[in-house]
Image: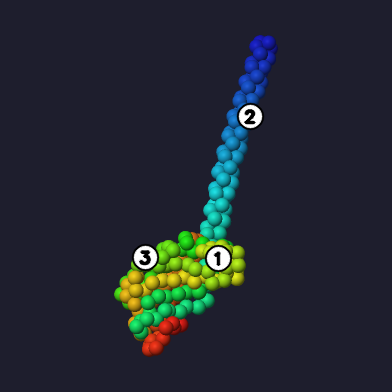
């Protein structure tokens, strides 16, 4: 009887040890699974954060370029014939802090009394184009504004685009560079063009 009792005690002890071992292994498996899930989640968060940072930097650079990479209108005048402005000329320079601006890649929106058009660069100013010629260009970079000293003349043929501009008429000009930066200018024809060959507008 004593032998049977000892055998039963031994069986109980072995069973308890086995049960605890199984519980310990189960806990270890759950712990490892949680660590793996946490590691995967951390990796996803890091990748997402890196992607968002890259996108925000790119967006910031594009926004900065759209603000800073613009041209500045120094002056404007019109060529007069028969008491009408037949051609508009803008003297432009590179805006402060701007990168190089290629005017051949720019566009100009012409909103006049009789016509609204988008003009592109060409060597001849006609109904759909503007021209660029150097006024001050030490290194011969025209039509690229690559220094702060460059001064170029942007010319538009009003007669070909719509009609010659009469006294007191106005044209709105919106010059957009290759960066998307915009410069707006209002060309106002004087109230009197009598005996004038060129006028400031």
Cα–Cα gap, marks 1 and 2: 75 Å
Residue 53 visible in the displayed image: yes
Cα–Cα gap, marks 2 and 3: 82 Å
Q: Which residue is mark 2?
A: 24
In the rendered view, tell whether residue 65 sits above or below residue 200. above
Is mark 3 in CB contact (under 8 Å) with mark 1? no
Please state if 45 lies on the left or on the right of 188 as rendered.
right
Give SS at disc 1: strand
Label 2 Cα neighbours within 10 Å, binned few <14 / some 14-19 / many ≥20: few
Residue at horizontal 58 percent and vertical 34 percent from the top:
33
Residue at horizontal 46 percent and vertical 82 percent from the top:
200
The tally of labels here is 3
Residue 172 in the image: x percent, y percent?
Answer: 40, 75
In the rendered view, tell whether residue 181 sits above or below residue 46. below
Q: Nearer the viewer, residue 144 or 17?
A: 144
Is mark 1 in CB contact (under 8 Å) with mark 2? no
Label 3 Cα neighbours within 10 Å, binned few <14 / some 14-19 / many ≥20: some
Residue 128 numbered tag? 3
Label 1 Cα neighbours within 10 Å, binned few <14 / some 14-19 / many ≥20: many
Residue 148 in the image: x percent, y percent?
Answer: 60, 69
N-terminal-most mark, 2 or 3: 2
Q: Which residue is mark 1?
A: 145
In front: label 1 or label 2: 1
Residue 83 numbered tag? none
N-terminal-most mark, 3 or 1: 3
Residue 194 in the image: x percent, y percent?
Answer: 38, 89
Give SS at disc 2: helix
N-terminal-most mark, 1 or 2: 2
Give SS at disc 3: loop
Q: Nearer the viewer, residue 76 or 13?
A: 76
């Amino acid at each position: 009887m004593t032998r049977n009792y000892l055998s039963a005690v031994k069986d109980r002890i072995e069973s308890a040890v086995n049960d605890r071992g199984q519980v310990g292994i189960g806990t270890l498996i759950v712990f490892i699974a949680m660590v793996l899930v946490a590691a995967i989640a951390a990796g996803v968060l890091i990748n997402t954060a890196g992607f968002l940072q890259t996108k925000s930097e790119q967006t910031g650079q594009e926004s900065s370029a759209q603000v800073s990479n613009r041209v500045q209108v120094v002056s404007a005048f019109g060529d007069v014939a028969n008491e009408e402005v037949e051609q508009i000329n803008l003297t432009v320079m590179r805006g402060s802090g701007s990168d190089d601006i290629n005017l051949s890649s720019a566009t100009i929106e012409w909103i006049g009394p009789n016509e609204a058009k988008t003009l592109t660069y060409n060597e001849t100013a006609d109904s759909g184009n503007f021209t660029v010629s150097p006024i001050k260009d030490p290194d011969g970079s025209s039509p690229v504004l690559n220094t702060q000293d460059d001064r170029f003349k942007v010319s538009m043929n009003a007669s070909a685009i719509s009609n010659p501009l009469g006294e007191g008429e106005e044209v709105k000009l919106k010059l957009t560079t290759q960066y998307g930066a915009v410069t707006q200018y209002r060309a106002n024809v004087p109230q009197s063009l009598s005996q004038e060959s060129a006028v400031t507008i």
